[in-house]
Image (spheres, rainbow, N blue to C red):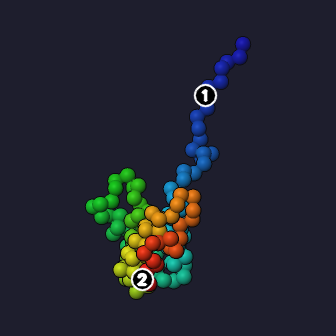
């Protein structure tokens, strides 16, 4: 008579890694940050200081679901502090993308050309 096999426990080392990015824009923001760092625009401790300041905002969600929103805000602030971008231009461009997204039919690629008001200068 054969003994039934004991259920095997799953080995975390053999399980696939959990998904790092929930949305493509998160991976793009991450890659952009790494590329700007590698180009010498800022050092990693400086980046960590900006990111940490954003993650410690009272508005930050405890579950971390808004991590990459804070990541993006930290990057925008860091770039503004370096004079690479100015905050009003970033805000105008974000609004243009939002208008374009709302004006674009489902299934069609969203481009700034779809902004009914026109692209910011």
Residue density around tag 1, few if under 14, some if 14–19, many if 20 or more, within 10 Å: few
| Closer to viewer: mark 1 or mark 2 | 2
Can you tell which mark lies on residue 70?
none
**Looking at the image, can residue 108 be seen?**
yes
**Which of 74 and 121 lies nearest the eye of the viewer?**
121
- At 60% from the left and 28% from the top, the residue drawn is 7
**Looking at the image, can residue 79 be seen?**
no
- The outermost residue toward the left is 58
- Badge 1 is on which residue? 7
Q: Is residue 8 above or below residue 114?
A: above
- At 39% from the left and 58% from the top, the residue drawn is 66
Which quarter of the rendered picture does the N terminus lie within? top right
**Which of 14 and 21 lies nearest the eye of the viewer?**
21
**Which of 25 and 75 lies nearest the eye of the viewer?**
25
- The outermost residue toward the front is 116
Q: Based on the displayed image, in which of its 4 quarters is residue 85 positioned?
A: bottom left
What x and y, as percent, mark residue 42? 46, 81
Which quarter of the rendered picture does the C terminus lie within? bottom left
- At 35% from the left and 80% from the top, the residue drawn is 88
Mark 1–mark 2 Cα distance, whole angstroms, equals 57 Å
Can you tell which mark lies on residue 85?
2
Image check: 94 left or right of 13? Answer: left
- The outermost residue toward the bottom is 83
- Tag 1 secondary structure: loop
What x and y, as percent, mark residue 15? 60, 45
**Which of 25 and 71 lies nearest the eye of the viewer?**
25
Image check: 114 left or right of 70? Answer: right
What x and y, as percent, mark residue 77? 37, 76
Of the two numbered discs 1 and 2 on the same chain, state the one appearing first in sequence: 1
């Amino acid at each position: 008579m054969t003994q039934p096999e004991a259920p095997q426990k799953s080995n975390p080392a053999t399980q696939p890694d959990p998904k790092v990015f929930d949305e493509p824009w998160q991976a793009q923001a991450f890659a952009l940050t790494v590329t700007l760092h590698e180009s010498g625009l800022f050092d990693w401790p400086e980046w960590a200081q900006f990111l940490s300041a954003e993650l410690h905002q009272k508005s930050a969600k405890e579950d971390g679901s808004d991590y990459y929103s804070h990541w993006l805000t930290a990057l925008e602030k860091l770039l503004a502090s370096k004079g690479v971008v100015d905050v009003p231009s970033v805000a105008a461009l974000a609004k243009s993308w939002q208008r374009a997204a709302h004006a674009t039919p489902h299934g069609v690629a969203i481009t700034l050309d779809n902004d009914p008001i026109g692209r910011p200068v």
